Image: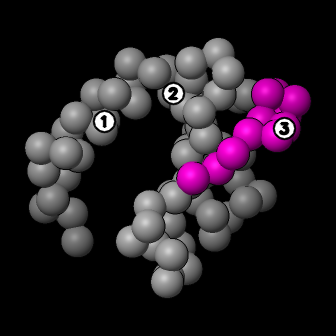
């Protein structure tokens, strides 16, 4: 679990595709190289925090369509 003080003042970002709809994941890049991920419909739930390496691997898979079968 990440301390609340680490998340204070971070900038949360979401995909432009979700601008017109509710429910999306938001990410924040933490100063220590980690990435926080949260569901903007459930802000009471603590963010999931991963290392920069894990984030890069996930993004690589997403860009290559490895998760396109979902939905």
**Residue at the image position 65 percent from the left and 16 percent from the top:** 32
Describe the element under mark 2 as helix, strand or loop: strand
Is 6 one of the magenta-colored residues?
A: yes
Q: Nearer the viewer, mark 1 or mark 3?
A: 3
**Sequence-wise first label, 1 or 3:** 3
Distance CA(mark 1)–CA(mark 3): 25 Å
Q: Which residue is disc 1 drawn over? A: 58
Residue found at the far bottom of this picture = 20
Describe the element under mark 1 as helix, strand or loop: helix
Return the residue nearer the eye: 24 or 12.
12
Residue 50 is marked as: 2
Describe the element under mark 3 as helix, strand or loop: loop
Distance CA(mark 2)–CA(mark 3): 17 Å
Screen quadrant of the N terminus? top right
**Residue at the image position 46 percent from the left and 72 percent from the top:** 18
Q: Are marks 2 and 1 in contact (CB under 8 Å)?
A: yes
Q: Is residue 6 above or below residue 16?
A: above
Screen quadrant of the C terminus? bottom left
**Sequence-wise first label, 2 or 3:** 3
Classify mark 1: residues with Cα within 10 Å, few (<14), some (14-19) or many (20+). some
Residue 37: % across, % down: 56, 44
Residue bounds of the magenta highlight: 3-13
Chief secondary structure of the magenta span?
loop
Q: Which residue is disc 3 drawn over? A: 8
Classify mark 2: residues with Cα within 10 Å, few (<14), some (14-19) or many (20+). some
Q: Is residue 49 left or right of residue 68?
A: right
**Sequence-wise first label, 2 or 1:** 2
**Residue at the image position 51 percent from the left and 75 percent from the top:** 19
Residue 57: % across, % down: 28, 28
Classify mark 3: residues with Cα within 10 Å, few (<14), some (14-19) or many (20+). few
Distance CA(mark 2)–CA(mark 1): 10 Å
């Amino acid at each position: 679990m990440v301390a609340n003080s680490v998340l204070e003042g971070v900038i949360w970002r979401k995909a432009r595709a979700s601008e017109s709809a509710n429910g999306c994941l938001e990410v924040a890049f933490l100063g220590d190289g980690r990435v926080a991920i949260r569901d903007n419909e459930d802000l009471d739930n603590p963010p999931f925090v991963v290392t920069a390496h894990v984030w890069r691997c996930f993004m690589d898979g997403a860009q290559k369509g490895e998760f396109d079968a979902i939905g």
